[in-house]
Image (cartoon, helix red, strand yellow):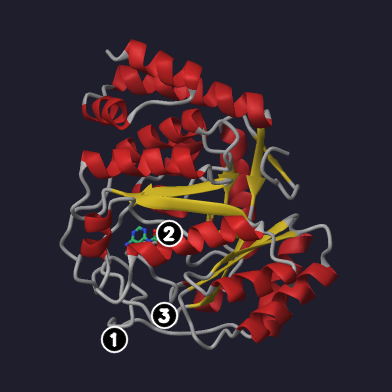
Amino acid sequence: MQTELIEKLYKTGDLSAEELKGLIENRSTDDFELLSRYARQRCEESYGDRVFTRGLIEISSYCKNDCLYCGLRRSNGNAERYRLSQEEILACCENGYGLGFRTFVLQGGEDGYYTDEFLCGVVSEIKEKYPDCAVTLSLGERSRESFQRLFDAGADRYLLRHETADKAHYERLHPKEMSYDNRMRCLSDLRDIGYQVGCGFMVGSPFQTVDCLAADLRFIKEFQPHMVGIGPFIRHKDTPFADMPDGTAELTLFLLSVVRLLLPKVLLPATTALGTISPTGREQGLMAGANVVMPNLSPVLVRKKYSLYDNKICTGEEAAECAGCLERRVSSVGRRLVCERGDYGS
Ligand code: 5AD
Ligand code: FES
């Protein structure tokens, strides 16, 4: 058992790439038990028994990109496409506000239809109607000027997973017109502008090695994001990775605990992908150090169309059902789902 290494991570909040690699390669169930106990402890010191909730609104399934792993890729002719109007987005927020959400996450593919003008209008309207709420955007890569305009319109946070911190691996997951350097440029612009920023990666994505994971963890430690999104890779039947194996809940949970110990105050969701790969994945995520859940607020009519991967959960449920379901799941592990903005360090 790797007790010494785990205690070092717990005490110093840091390990070298080599140490992280060893920790992952040699991991045992006993290691995970100790690691997750420490991770829960750090999480409790930072946030008590609170779990923050974010209302996720999937605004568009159009995407101009062609990431090899994603069901929304432009080459997927079987994908059903939709985009929500300003009125539809605001209706989701109204519904969500009534259910107690104080953060709205607007997520979508890279859809050219959503100009800065359109998005700034939506963001400022939400902030005007709900001044006590945070707005998080998750709309992919944009120019620095665009990020700045959206920030000036009132957006508080931005989620942009780095996907992998290994450049060669990045190039195996993306078509050649996408670049690792631009991804990193976006993340540093977002941080400079003043957003609370989230990065993250998939666990078990095709061609991922333990070296890739060690690089992801070192990147996360050095970039010091406010949020980290980690979920298992899950294949989508209409992508080039249709026959690749899925990531595992086991490794995802292990890495959630490592991230909590590297960044004690990080906002760390128990993701929908984790809940898809395992029926109790999200509860286990909370037990491993996660402190955020992101129920779906999208209109039920479009839910199935926002298909990043196969068998995604929550595609038939109304917003109120997802909110209630998650509240019960959070309580079942002795934690408390709260109606707060849930800012970093709050
Ligand atoms: N499996 C799991 N996660 C995926 N994502 C995209 N496609 C998949 C997939 N097949 C993740 C990416 C992206 C986020 C919105 O969803 O990491 O950044
Ligand atoms: Fe959507 Fe459980 S969170 S049904």
**Residue at image mark 1:** 77
Q: Can residue 288 be seen in this view?
A: no
Q: Can you identify the residue that label 2 sits on?
A: 184
Residue type pointed to by label 2: Met
Q: Do the residues labelled 3 and 2 touch (CB within 8 Å)?
A: no
Up the image or down, 94 lies above or below 161; here it is: below
Which image quarter is the C terminus in? top right
Which of disc 2 and disc 1 is earlier in sequence? 1
- Depth-wise, is mark 3 or mark 1 nearer the camera? 3
Instruction: Report the side of 119 relative to 287 (left or right).
Output: right
Q: Which residue lies furthest to the left in this view?
A: 243
Circle 3 sits on which residue?
63
Q: Residues within 10 Å of mark 3 (few under 14, many from 20)?
A: many
- Residue 253, given in percent of the width and then of the height, sits at 39, 36
Q: Nearer the viewer, residue 79 or 192?
A: 192
User: Viewer-proximal residue, 97 or 212?
Assistant: 212
First in sequence, mark 3 or 1: give its number.
Answer: 3
C-alpha distance separating marks 3 and 2: 20 Å
- Secondary structure of the residue carrying tag 3 is loop
- Label 1 sits on a secondary structure element that is loop
Q: Dividing the image into 4 quarters, which one contains the N terminus?
A: top left
Number of the front mark, 3 or 2 = 2
| Residue 119, disc | none
Residue at left offset 70%, top offset 46%: 343
29 vs 147, left or right, is: left
Residue 102 visible here: yes
Q: Nearer the viewer, mark 1 or mark 2?
A: 2
